[in-house]
Image (cartoon, grey):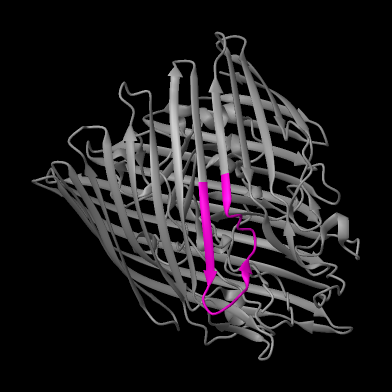
Amino acid sequence: MEALVMHRPRKYRVWIRAGITLALVSTASIAGNGQTDNVVVTASRLAQPSAELSQSVNIIARDEIEHLHAASAAEVLRQIPGTNVIQQGGRGGITSILLRGGEPNFTLVLIDGIQVNDPTNSRGGAYDLGSLEQAQVGQVETIFGAMSPVYGSDALSGVINFISRDAASGSDIRIAAGTDGYGSVNGFYGGTLANIDIGLGAYVTDDNGDVAGADYEAGGVNGKLATTFGGSGTAGLSFGYQELDTTGFPEDSGGPLLAVLRDLDTRDITEARAGADLGYDFAERWKTAIRASIYTRDEAYSSPGIATGTFDGVPPNAADTDFDRQQVSATLATELPGGMSGLIGAEWKNENGRSAGTIDFGFPVPTNFDLDRDTVSAFAEAHWTLGPVTAQGGIRWDDPDAIRSVVTGRLGVLYRLPDGLTELRANWGEGFKAPSFFALAHPIVGNPELRSETGDSIDIGIRRRFRGGDGAFEILAFRNEYDDLVDFDPDLFINVNRDTVETRGAEAAVEYAPLDQLHIRAHVTYLDTDIKGSDAVLRGRPKWRGGIVIDWSPIQDWRWVTHAYALDEFYESSVATGSRRLAGYARVDTALTWQTTEAFSVGFAVDNLFDNAYQEAVGFPAAGFRGRIGAKYRF
């Protein structure tokens, strides 16, 4: 049978060809970039230093983000081992991330712990990472592996938490300009007033992206407030609001190089989020916490459709969607003698999505839907350290409306060898994803009888620090299996559950600091995927991917950060061409910072330094050589 290409779930794409499915895969990872003393808030509700975690964790701190001078937060993610960032043309197109071969909608995306995945979109709830502004991000935590025992639905491949800047990051104003219409102005205040830590930021960005048709304009505000009370109480508030206007060629259209129809997709988006938390410690060992959040997203979308090519075309379509999510959770945690800690909790989540749209078959056909879903959950976690062994685990019960309840669990073990340099890690976890509102309720392709997609992940690895403490290396192997994957059935003309996918592979990473002024990190990933009972292959999954980051301060007040990555050939697809194998490529980005005074600095950045021509999606050329210059004033 001819090898076919597995498609990500998108829009009204209907390709009448036997064997084509929408597979979803996942996970495992090497530990982050050597920062073993960071407290990680994403891996567990029991916040732990990264050195105490068995899981695969990557942390990108504010200092690194700042000196990369990246155009967007999504560009920062390219340096994380085991990820593959795919941008459809410039920033005006959709930007997705695949963790260890997992589908974009299998990654739970959080901003300050607030989930921002939108299940009304045609991508199965995948979040467009191009809409995040890097200047407002304080830290990025990426957790690899099934994390449903902590977060419930959607955390199949892993979790990415963008933690915004807070009062401790200080106050500054930044202005940047670059080639191809790039411009950005950011301001941030960080300080303390009347026992309240305050972080407030605002930004405006315009980025044409050097790719035909792609245009991106955004502006927004965000903030954090935190205080203590009564000696043992804490209270916090985080919020954000942004408006985006983007244009780009439709996904899978063949882009500016191959699309027959030359009109563009347009998206007008408004996003808002707010979260509040209240905590109190009592009786020495007990801690209570209550957290509440709300997220809303309104999007007006219009597409000219896609002309028929190798695959059937897509008629013109448009939709106005409104989505909101409210979550409330309560936890009770304790620390017990003998190095043990535990937590129990409960959560309620309400999601409501409304879409008013049409698809043009020569006459307008309504595609309206309105769906409301409550999910009630209960969970427990435990962490235990006894001598050289640390164990952690969790269990969670989720009961979504009209869908079978799911119980998931996880277990991880970390063992420190007597030499004090070597650690062994092993992890097992389960995950699930409730069907998206689009897959359930769309009046043309939706199926209200869909089941949750489920899966499990296993990884095992070894990490060893160099004698002298100037570096470390890690080697890891992983395997993941996913069942009941949602796929479009062309005969029934609806979404159905079917297919099992297995992903397996290995990673190696090394970090080395031969000098105080020079830090080097390198990584390589091998990934193999298998759709059981099918010769189809998954798109956007190169077998090999590797990269290196060189962080060098050649002289006082100057810092030069260069990161390069290369990947193997991979399959992609478009309506115009059908399945196509895209060539592998290499890319080098570099950034230089000059701290002219204690308060003032200047940054220079170049993306795609050698102007390599390549495509991340069929017919969408990646941006060539792009330069930026910026200035920052701290006050």
Q: Position of residue 626 (x, y in %)?
A: 77, 33
Does residue 246 lie above or below 186 as drawn?
below
For the point 64% across and 58% down, which residue is it?
Answer: 540
The quarter holding residue 121 reads bottom right
Q: Position of residue 239 (x, y in %)?
A: 51, 47
Does residue 378 lie above or below 628 as drawn?
below
For the point 58% across and 55% down, which residue is it?
Answer: 543
For the point 63% across and 73% down, which residue is it?
Answer: 536
Circle count: 0
The answer to which of 309 and 182 lies nearer the viewer is 309
Q: Farthest residue to the bottom: give it.
A: 492
Residue 81 in sight = no
Q: Is residue 539 magenta?
A: yes
Q: Quadrant of the C terminus?
A: top right
Name the side, left or right, on which 38 lies relative to 532: left
Name the side, left or right, on which 261 lies relative to 143: right
Magenta span: 525-545
For the point 56% across and 34% down, which residue is it?
Answer: 548
The answer to which of 42 and 269 lies nearer the viewer is 42
Q: Quadrant of the N terminus?
A: bottom right
Name the side, left or right, on which 414 lies relative to 238: left
Q: Position of residue 313 (x, y in %)?
A: 82, 75
The answer to which of 106 and 172 lies nearer the viewer is 106
Q: Is residue 616 magenta?
A: no
The quarter holding residue 118 reads bottom right
Q: Farthest residue to the front: give it.
A: 1
Does residue 255 lie above or below 208 as drawn?
below
The answer to which of 588 and 288 lies nearer the viewer is 588
Residue 610 in sight = yes
Q: Position of residue 427 (x, y in %)?
A: 32, 56
